[in-house]
């Protein structure tokens, strides 16, 4: 069974503090959090975005795991 990365819990805590009451955020919100453009997020194939209907969402748990990688 794989272990979680050391910074995963800290990243998740920080994300939950930045986006209280949310389990998922939009790509523009993720871009603001990272300080990059949303185009840069769309260009990164490793970024954990999911298409939901006609828009993309970012699940905070997956975002925290991506940040810890």
Image: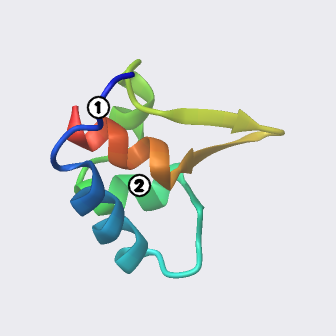
Q: Tell me, what colour scheme is on the image? A: rainbow
Residue 51 placement: quadrant: top right
Residue bearing the label numbered 1 = 3
Residue at (22% x, 56% y) in the render? 35
Q: Position of residue 4 (x, y in %)?
A: 29, 37
The mark closer to the camera, 2 or 1, is 1
Q: Position of residue 27 (x, y in %)?
A: 51, 49
Residue bearing the label numbered 2 = 30
Tag 2–tag 1 contact (CB < 8 Å): no
Q: In the picture shown, does residue 55 fall above or below 60?
A: above
Residue at (40% x, 30% y) in the render? 47
Q: Residues within 10 Å of mark 1 (few under 14, many from 20)?
A: few
Q: Residues within 10 Å of mark 2 (few under 14, many from 20)?
A: many
The secondary structure type at the circle numbered 2 is helix
Q: Is 26 displayed left or right of 44 in the figure? A: right
Front residue of this view, candidates 68 and 27: 68
Residue at (34% x, 24% y) in the render? 2
Mark 2 and mark 1: span between their CA atoms? Answer: 25 Å
Say whether disc 2 or disc 1 marks the residue closer to the N-terminus. Answer: 1
Q: Residue furthest top?
A: 45
Q: Residue furthest front?
A: 1
Q: In the picture shown, does residue 59 fall above or below 15?
A: above
């Amino acid at each position: 069974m794989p272990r979680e990365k050391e910074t995963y819990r800290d990243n998740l805590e920080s994300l939950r503090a930045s986006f209280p009451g949310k389990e998922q955020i939009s790509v523009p919100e993720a871009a603001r959090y990272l300080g990059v453009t949303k185009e840069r997020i769309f260009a990164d194939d490793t970024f954990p975005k999911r298409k939901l209907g006609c828009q993309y969402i970012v699940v905070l748990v997956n975002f925290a795991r991506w940040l810890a990688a």
